[in-house]
Image (tube, coloured by chain):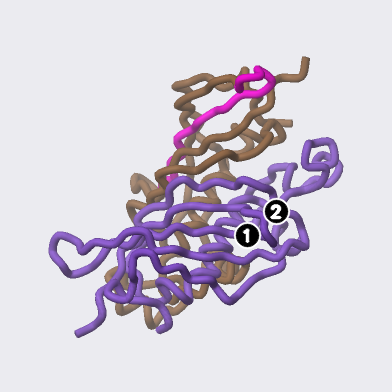
Chain colours: A brown, B purple
Amino acid sequence: MTGRYYEEFAVGTTYEHDKRRTVTESDNQRFCDLTMNQQPLHLDAEFAAETEFGERIVNGLYTMSLAVGLSIPDTTDGTIVANLAYDDVEHPAPVYVGDTLRARTTVTDKRETSDGDRGVVTMHVEAHVGDRLVCSFDRTVLARKRPS
Amino acid sequence: MTGRYYEEFAVGTTYEHDKRRTVTESDNQRFCDLTMNQQPLHLDAEFAAETEFGERIVNGLYTMSLAVGLSIPDTTDGTIVANLAYDDVEHPAPVYVGDTLRARTTVTDKRETSDGDRGVVTMHVEAHVGDRLVCSFDRTVLARKRPS
């Protein structure tokens, strides 16, 4: 168990997640295959060359999902009941094959559930490639309390 | 090109997407691997057996991403500039291995950009397994106008 229980989250704390990932062409293709997403902007180099991006861009939901994955060890690995919501998911800049993604999470809110048995924690997650912000969102989870 | 240009979206229209997918154990495992998400709730049968779900549950971002993938042919296949945002992403019920997911999209808002060259379209997306709502969210895209 490497994640944090409700009591261990502190509003204002930022975790810079250690693990990064260089996004490969295969990652993007396999993600699109698994999710049955055939958007040519992600998969068709000739189509993408005619767009404002000039080449295939990585599926934004891969970027988001990878950012969450990178954040799990420092946040909710084994200590989550369920994800309650994601909000304001934005992709202010594209991700291209070969980009190396890193993520950080800041705890923005926490409160106990009404029965006091669990806690709701909201975190702001950002993913960067170098200095470029490529994805941001709020993640709200139902977290376990530390076993007594 | 099977998607819709800005002019072809009508507020209030619902698309019931034809393609469905039965979510396999492999889908869930590969999604977690690709996104470096090692949450035991998704990957560790013995751990999951001790939770309130009783077994591994499918990664919620896979459910969300698959719902988007299933929706692409009827919505933005080749007609999108970029995804602008996802909001209010919720997972009101779990998805288990073997569940067959289907999705529907309802257009909830549309407006031209200030320069009139493109359009912003907001859609409400729902994913169901049988009668069970397993994921819902709003998706806002920047859509191309029909070539003149």
**A7 vs B77: above or below:** above
**In whole angstroms, how far apart are the C-alphas of marks 1 and 2?**
9 Å
Residue to which mark 2 is pinned: B95
Magenta portion: prevailing SS class: strand
Kindly state the secondary structure of the residue where label 1 is placed.
strand
Query: What chain is tagged by disc 1?
Result: B
**B146 vs B96: above or below:** below
For the residue pair B72 and A114, the one nearer the viewer reads as: A114
Relative side of B70 to B31, left or right: left
Quarter holding the C terminus of chain A is top right
> Percent from the top left, x then y, of residue B2?
43, 82
The amino acid type found where label 2 is placed reads Val
> Percent from the top left, x then y, of residue A118?
66, 23
The amino acid type found where label 1 is placed reads His
Residue to which mark 1 is pinned: B128
Within-10-Å neighbours for mark 1: few <14, some 14–19, many 20+: many
Relative side of A65 to A5, left or right: left
Asked whether A119 falls inside the magenta stretch, the response is yes
Q: Residue at 32% of width from left, 59% of height from top?
A: B109
> Percent from the top left, x then y, of residue A94?
37, 59
Q: Is disc 1 in contact with disc 2, using a CB cutoff of under 8 Å?
A: no
> Percent from the top left, x then y, of residue B97?
77, 58
Q: Residue at 53% of width from left, 53% of height from top?
A: B136
Stretch of the chain drawn in magenta? A113-128
Query: What chain is tagged by disc 2?
Result: B
- Label 1 or label 2, whichever comes before in sequence order: 2
Q: Residue at 50% of width from left, 69% of height from top?
A: B71
Residue farthest left in this picture? B115
For the residue pair B76 and A126, the one nearer the viewer reads as: B76
For the residue pair B142 and A17, the one nearer the viewer reads as: B142
